[in-house]
Amino acid sequence: MKKILIKTAKIIGIILGSIIGFVALLCIITLLWGAAQMSRGSVTESLPVVPDDFTPAVRLVVYTDTHNENENVADAIDTAYALFDNDSTYKGVDGFFGLGDFTSIGTEGDYEAYVNTLKEHIREETVYINICGNHEFKQDNYKEIFEKYFPHGPDTVTEINGFTCIGFSGEKLLTEWTFTPKSTSWLSDEIHKAEETAGDKPIFVFLHPHPFGTVYGSSFWCSPQVNPAFAGHSKVINFSGHSHFPMNDPRSINQSTYTSVGVGAMARFETDKNYMVGQHPERYEDAAQFCVVEADNDGSVRIRGYDLISDSYFCDYFIENVNDTDTFAYTYKNMKANDEAPLFPENAKASVSTDENGDYRVTFTEAEVPEGYIVHEYEVKITDEKGNEVYSDNFVAPYYIVDDEDTQGFTVSKDVLTKGNTYTLTVTAESAYRLYSDPAVMTFSVN
């Protein structure tokens, strides 16, 4: 018995050691990759602005991670048509692209409801392409189900107005998280083929997970296997989801030797906090974002994020020339250089109210940031009249909610504050690129 226990302990030790070693290796790779990404490219005085004479030759609408929120899908389609049916520069929508996770666990019932929504709202003349996400991979016969409901395979190449659009689902390798080498080889081959006929046009690639180390959320919700297929192909613009990280974050576009775009989510946001993924901040269920992609024949591309809840655009990026990496403005290095530390206005103030549970809602004037940038987190500290700290925390700012509010807020338990007392609130704002404001000091009284 003792020998068995010793042997078992050794096996457990080997397994734990292997896991720790793998995690350590992953951390080292992440740091090295991050250092390379952050040093790439040059710094410009400002970010590109869409020129007045930009005229698209194609327009695509991209969305991801709908997870049975088919009402949002219908709204996105109808909204896109309404936006562009009478557009003075370029009329209409040429294609809709769904980037996977349109089901819960890949059942036929989910497929049927989703596809019925598409058929009811997408016009006959408009192309629509969908791919598998990891939730579709939860069924072993996912290929069979997919091909039953869609007129194309999980991996597909479509020409729209002379632009090559590659939809990549990949093949599941053992788990829903990994692709077979055969499928990633297919992706690489199709990119090479597209380059031969693309001329100056971009090549659009649609997939579910982010390439590792590119856009916001790609340090964890990613597939490193697809990185080699994209590397060095400047014409490639890949659109991905999976992370549910908001497209409002300026890190959701990234350029290195190609361009990556994270297109947010149509169902439930996720963010990181203190570098930890898996965070679901306040109002995270208010997710309904899609992406509008326009390109001309000379290598220029416009990418906009649209929020269905507020019916408004919230970001606008312009790639001057996909054929020239020297013009790439959306590198991590340049985006950070154009960011600025958040700034609280001189008249910033705080107040407090009581919610339906009797807890206290503390609100304060939000910090200001340059257009196109965000406050990602706030660090808050409350001290009493004697200077004793009674509360401290940090929380993700609701930048993913598009509204006109000029205040931010957080909730503290009814046991933290006392009626009749005055408190001091100290707030520090942190930008997406880890730039910090000077602390703002405000007072409020609990009545």
Image (spheres, helix red, strand yellow):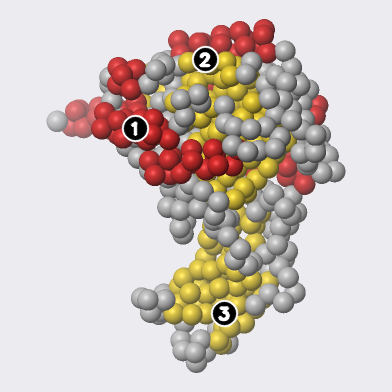
- Residue pushed farthest bottom? 420
| Residue sitting nearer the eye, 5 or 166 | 166
| Residue sitting nearer the eye, 439 or 51 | 51
Secondary structure type for disc 3: strand
Q: Residues within 10 Å of mark 2 (few under 14, many from 20)?
A: some
Image-quadrant location for residue 139: top left
Quadrant containing the N terminus is top left
Answer yes or no: is residue 327 visible. yes
Coordinates of residue 414 in the picture (x, y in percent) = 40, 79
- Residue pushed farthest front? 86
Q: Which residue is mark 2?
A: 157
Q: Which residue is mark 3?
A: 351
383 w.r.t. 208: above or below: below
Identify the residue shown where x is 55% and y is 42%.
Answer: 82
Q: Which residue is mark 1?
A: 116
37 w.r.t. 245: above or below: above
**Could you tell me how far apart the alpha carbons at marks 1 and 2 are, in whole angstroms?**
23 Å
Identify the residue shown where x is 64% and y is 26%.
Answer: 58
Q: Amino acid at mark 1?
A: Asn
Identify the residue shown where x is 42% and y is 16%.
Answer: 152
Q: Residues within 10 Å of mark 1 (few under 14, many from 20)?
A: few
Counting residues from the start of the chain, the first of labels 2 and 3 encountered is: 2
